[in-house]
Image: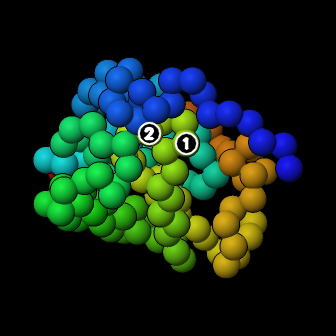
Amino acid sequence: MDLRSWPSDFLAKKAGIGCPQCATGRVDETDHGVRYYNGPAADGYLQRQGPTVGYSVVIFRGRHVGEPQAMTPDEHAAFWSEVSTVARAITAVYEPIHLNFQILGNQDPHVHVHIVPRFDPDPAPSLPLPAAAWENGRVLSTEELVQQVDRLKGALGQ
């Protein structure tokens, strides 16, 4: 096994120093996606590119927190409640067979959840998506992105 060191700035980012999520703030659009959910504790972004249609990221916005266990009980409850709100909108719009919730933070140590809709047929039913699904993910056109964000906002009653 080839072992490598973590990036030299990882622990600083995890502590909130130079955190890209904190630096960016609560913007309507990023290089990666467009915000369709803006709650007290979190923002939900439809991703421009992903392994499946509806792929979204929900970012904790209460303060900088590098890992879920560092959240207070109230922050944890508020965040996961809002993740569930976003998940219900994804389910209403795309009708997936299942949703995967991924908390990684390996590159961006600020609490956020990737919500990946799974459909039938699927490249790996009952298993995690293979790397090829991520590497060859579909890129939404600007028109598709706008239409899907509007549908998600509609499902949220916005």
Is there a contact, CB below 8 Å, between mark 2 and mark 1? yes
Q: Secondary structure at mark 1?
A: loop
Vertically, is 121 above or below 139? below
Residue 130 in the image: state x and y as whole percent. Answer: 75, 59
Vertically, is 84 above or below 70? below
Is residue 144 found left or right of 61 in the rendered image?
A: right
Disc 1 designates what residue?
A: 106
Disc 2 designates what residue?
A: 109
Q: Secondary structure at mark 2?
A: loop
Is residue 8 found left or right of 145 in the rendered image?
A: right
Q: Is residue 89 visible in this depiction of the protein?
A: no
Q: Which one is in front, 111 or 91? A: 111
Vertically, is 56 above or below 33? below
Q: Quadrant of residue 64?
A: top left
Distance from Cα at disc 2 to Cα at disc 1: 6 Å
Q: Which one is in front, 146 or 3? A: 3
Q: Residue at x 33, y 30 (%)?
A: 16
